[in-house]
Image (cartoon, rainbow, N blue to C red):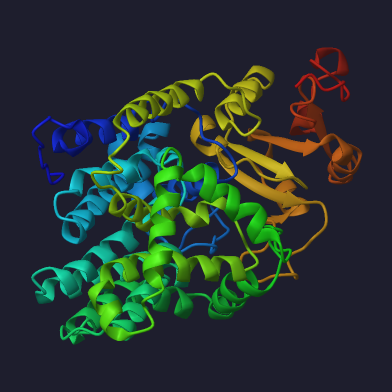
Amino acid sequence: MWGCNMSADRDWTTNGRAVAVIVAVLAFAFLGSRGLWDPDEGRYTNVALNMLARGDWLIPHRSFEMAHWTKPPLTYWAIASSLATLGVNTWAARLASALAYLVSAWTVGRIAGRLMPGRSSIGALVFATMLLPAVASQLVTTDMLLATCELLAMWGYVERRWGDGRLRWSLLMFAGFGLAFLTKGPPGLLPALAIVATELAAPQPRRVLTFTGVLAFLAIALPWFVAVVIEVPGLLHYFLGHEVVNRVASNEFGRHGEWYGWLVVYLPTLLVGTLPWIVPLARSIVASCRVARGWHTRVVRQADDKRFMLLAWIVLPLLIFCIARSRLPLYLLPLMAPLALLVTLGFDDAHPVPKRTVAVWCVVLFALRMAGLWIPSNQDARAWAAEIRARVPGPISQVIFVDDVPRYGLHLHLGAEIENVAIEDRSSLATVNPDVDEPIDRELADPDVAGAVWLTPTSRWPAVQSRVRSRGLVAQPFGSPLHDRIVFRVLHSSASATPQELPCASPCSPSH
C-alpha cells in the first residue's frame, strides 16, 4: 500500500506496513476525546447538523432560517455524511479530516514513488509527521480536505507526465481540481500554476489539457454553483466580490492584512509547521537553489523538470498567499505536501533519514494528542455546554447569542439550534450572509421563546433587559456570568420566578 521498499538493514522508514501503522495511529488517536473548538470546528459542524435537520443538502445554513455562504459545500457534505452514519459526536465530526489526512499521506507516498523510486514510504512518513498536517488532521476545517483534493490532482499530473501517461491520469487531475474548487473555490486551483509553469518551462509531448478532463472538472465543480446562484439573488456578486476580491485585496476580515502580515503569519508557520524536518528541508532548499542557477536554458530545465515542478508547486501558491491580505496559518497546509517531497528528495547516503529523531517525534505527537484532553480552553464548546447545563434547568431547544460571537459548537454538545441576534436591526446592511440572523425583536416574538437559553456580554445586559421589558417579557438570569456573559431565559411575566428563587437575580462578578 505504501510502496514498501525494504533495505538490507530493515530500515523501518522504508517499511510500508510500519509507516501505515504510524500514520493510522496519528490520524485516529483521541480523535473524538476533545470537545469541538470554536469558532471553526463549531461553525462547520453546525452547518452540517443543519443540513441533516433540514434535509437540505443544496443550501448550507448556519441557523434553521439563515443560509451560510462562506464556503462551498463539500466539507459540509463530508461532515454531515459522517454524522448521519456514525452518530452525532465529535469523533464522527472529525472523521472526514482524519481520513483526508490518511489519503494525503498515501498520495504523497505515491507521488514520491514516481518521482523518486524507492522512497514512497519515506515521502508518506515525512508528510504525516510534519506538525501542521498532524495537527490539522484533528480539526474540523476545510483545509485538510482541500489539501487532499489538490494532492489527488497533482498525483494525476505527475503520473500523466512521468508515469505511463494514460488518459485516466489527466481525468484524475481535473477531477481533483474540481473537488478542490467545490471545497474552497478558486484557491483550490493554485497548484495548477505549478503545472502551467512546468509545461511552459519544460514542455513534453503528452498533452495535459484534454477534453475529457475539462468535462470532468466542469461536471464536478460547476453544478452546485450554478444551482445556488440561480436560486439566490445577489449570490454571484457575493461570491466574486466578498469571498474572492475582498479576501485578496482588503483587510476586511482582519486577518493580518498589513503589508508585513505575511511575514508574521507564514514564516512561523513554515518554521514550526514543518517540524521535525526543518533541517533536511533547509538543506534541500539550498541544494535546489544551487541547481536552479542552470535553469536559464531549456535543456537543463528539461533534465531537472521534477525538481522544477516541486519548487513551482511551493513558490507560486506561496506568492499568492503573501499577496492576498487575508492570511491564516492553515492556508499553508496544501504546501506541506510539496515541502515533504522536497525533503524526501534531499535524502541520500550522506544525509540519511534521521530515524531516531523521527521515532522520538512520533512519541511527541502522540503525547500532544493526550495533552489536548486536559488543557483547558475558552474555545472548548463541550466545557461551555457543561457550564450552561449546570446553570439552567430543563430542556434547551435553542441557544441565542445577543450582540455576541456565537458558539456554534454548542449545537453538537447541547443538541440545540444556535442563533445570532442583535438589538439593532441590521437586516438592510447585507442581503446575502448578513452578520446576524435576525433582530432580537423578531426572536422575542417567537411563541417558543421560553424554551431558549440566551447569552449576552455583561456590557450589553442593561440594554438587553430594557428591550425584553419593552416586549412585556422578563429576562431571568442564571448563576454567575459565564466567561463575562450573562446566561438567561426570556419568560412571560406570569411565568417568571421571584427574585428569591433565582440563583443570581443580578449580574455577579465573573467566576470563569
Residue 37 x/y as whole percent: 55, 36
Judged left or right of residue 192, residue 45 is right
Residue 193 lies in what quarter of the image?
bottom left
Is residue 13 something one can see in this rendering? yes
User: Farthest front residue?
Assistant: 350
Asked if residue 17 is positioned above or below residue 97 in the image, the reply reads above
Judged left or right of residue 20, residue 137 is right
Asked if residue 13 is positioned above or below residue 269 in the image, the reply reads above
Which quarter shows the N terminus? Answer: top left
Residue 19 lies in what quarter of the image?
top left
Asked if residue 406 is positioned above or below residue 480 in the image, the reply reads below
Residue 154 x/y as whole percent: 28, 66
Which quarter shows the C terminus? Answer: top right
Looking at this view, is 30 or 205 the one in front? 205
Residue 226 lies in what quarter of the image?
bottom left
Judged left or right of residue 499, residue 401 is left
Looking at this view, is 280 or 219 the one in front? 280
Looking at this view, is 373 or 38 the one in front? 373
Residue 224 x/y as whole percent: 38, 71
Q: Residue at left 34%, top 56%?
A: 342
Q: Residue at left 12%, top 68%?
A: 163
Residue 413 x/y as whole percent: 51, 31
User: Farthest top residue?
Assistant: 500
Q: Residue at left 34%, top 71%?
A: 308
Judged left or right of residue 251, residue 298 is left
Count the marks.
0
Looking at this view, is 219 or 231 the one in front? 219
Q: Residue at left 48%, top 27%?
A: 34
Is residue 77 something one can see in this rendering? no
